[in-house]
Image: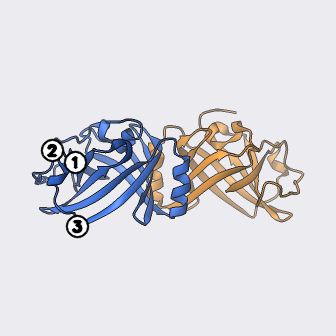
Chain colours: A blue, B orange
Amino acid sequence: MEIERKFLIADLQLVPTPSDRSLIKQAYLRADSTCAVRIRIRGDKSYLTIKGASSESGMSREEFEYEIPLSDAERMIKMCPNECIIKERLLIPYKGHTWEVDVFHGRHEGLVLAEVELSDESESVDLPLWVGREVTGDPRYYNSYLINHTI
Amino acid sequence: MEIERKFLIADLQLVPTPSDRSLIKQAYLRADSTCAVRIRIRGDKSYLTIKGASSESGMSREEFEYEIPLSDAERMIKMCPNECIIKERLLIPYKGHTWEVDVFHGRHEGLVLAEVELSDESESVDLPLWVGREVTGDPRYYNSYLINHTI
């Protein structure tokens, strides 16, 4: 089960220096409100990920992820009907949580999203000053929605 | 690349004793003419399989298969919109090839298909007397079609 909250970031310049950064390229063999089948290349690793429907709160989804060979990922990405999402992922530790900040490129240039993973839906989390409006559960900010739309 | 020919079997009683048999339960997160995302439980092993579109001859498809934990497979099968396919798979060696005979149960009870895997599309294969009409490339006999239809 993946449990996370998601926020917009209005000004990337306020975001502190990340502890890690990697380039992500991903595409979807299926992407709708009940299921996503995602191929992701992140740095030198590749993954096949299945996600289920979101919970009522929009915070939780079943998620199954498997590492796969890069050559498989490259070939499966060619089978995906939509353009890839290209984004840079910054990891930023803040008060006991590691925030993931996704800086989108290409057709979503300018979009920056921050996510924080929780161990359960009721876990409290200190919000850094540099995060903006919460968009948890807003389907317009799912990556599986963004592949078909421009913000 | 998966390259195979497929045949109907009219009379299961003519099929010789298999060298191996296993029960298969499978369902699809996506199943259309360009892509299949299949969850399969076969005996005590489970797999996540991605298949691409068929070649013009209907014999070849790109295929990527990953072994996954049984508990993952069971949960992902619940995410699939259609009824599972349940079939028994018999392995029957014949003149240098191993034939896979699938005996369907449930809503496709009575359907028996035989498949033989080839290393390239032009490879010749001796057909056993117990195989009937060839249905290679006929989409009605794809398992990904059968989940939505009754023969």
Instruction: Please state which of residues B118 and A24 is positioned toward the viewer in this rendering.
Output: A24
What label sits on residue A5 in the rendered view?
A: 1
User: The C terminus of chain A appears in which quarter of the rendering?
Assistant: top left
Instruction: Please state which of residues A133 and B119 is positioned toward the viewer in this rendering.
Output: A133
Q: Secondary structure at mark 2?
A: loop
For the residues labelled 1 and 2, the Cα–Cα distance comes to 12 Å
Q: Is residue A136 above or below residue A120?
A: above
Q: Is residue A107 left or right of residue B139?
A: left
Q: Is residue B47 visible?
A: no
Name which residue type carries label 2: Gly
User: Closer to the camera: disc 1 or disc 2?
Assistant: 2
Q: Is residue B20 above or below residue B113?
A: below
Q: Which residue is mark 3?
A: A19
Q: Secondary structure at mark 1?
A: strand
Q: Is residue B92 visible?
A: yes
Mark 1 and mark 3 on one chain? yes
Crowd around label 1: few <14 · some 14–19 · many ≥20 (10 Å): some
At which x and y percent is residue A32? 42, 37
Q: Which residue is mark 2?
A: A132
User: Closer to the camera: disc 1 or disc 3?
Assistant: 3
For the residues labelled 2 and 3, the Cα–Cα distance comes to 21 Å
Residue at image location 30% in from the left, 57% down from the top: A89
Q: Quadrant of residue B150?
A: top right
- The answer to which of marks 1 and 3 sits earlier in the sequence is 1
Q: Secondary structure at mark 3?
A: loop
